[in-house]
Image (cartoon, helix red, strand yellow):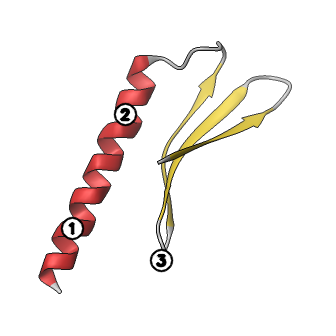
């Protein structure tokens, strides 16, 4: 999982993405106004990443 930061005049937008051979998944995006990323935002991204890995594993078993 990677983090992409886009700086604008108004705020920072952070996107957590997972890149695989067939696709790039945007797992979470939020507006970041402080230097520290809130734990909740990290948890959301982590939960979605784990769910994506599980789905990919389940799909691979079906094939």
Q: Which residue is mark 2?
A: 44
Tell me what residue is drawn at x 41 percent, y 19 percent.
39
In the rendering, at what x and y percent does residue 4 appear? Answer: 64, 43
Say which element carries label 1: helix
Question: Image quadrant of residue 62?
Answer: bottom left
Q: CA distance from mark 2 to mark 3?
A: 23 Å
As drawn, the residue found furthest toward the right would be 9
Does residue 6 appear to the left or right of 61 in the view shown?
right
Q: Residues within 10 Å of mark 1 (few under 14, many from 20)?
A: few
Tell me what residue is drawn at x 42 percent, y 28 percent.
42
In the rendering, at what x and y percent does residue 22 appear? Answer: 47, 77
Q: Which residue is mark 3?
A: 22
Sequence order check, earlier mark of 2 and 1: 2
Residue 29 to residue 55: above or below? above
Q: Residues within 10 Å of mark 3 (few under 14, many from 20)?
A: few
Tell me what residue is drawn at x 63 percent, y 22 percent.
32
**Where's the C terminus, which quadrant?**
bottom left
Question: Image quadrant of residue 9?
Answer: top right
Q: Which residue is mark 1?
A: 57
Does residue 60 appear to the left or right of 44 in the view shown?
left
Sequence order check, earlier mark of 2 and 3: 3
């Amino acid at each position: 999982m990677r983090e992409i930061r886009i700086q604008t005049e108004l705020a920072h937008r952070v996107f957590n993405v997972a890149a695989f051979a067939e696709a790039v998944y945007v797992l979470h995006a939020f507006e970041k106004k402080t230097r520290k990323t809130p734990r909740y935002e990290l948890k959301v991204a982590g939960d979605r990443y784990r769910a994506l890995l599980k789905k990919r594993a389940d799909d691979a078993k079906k094939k």
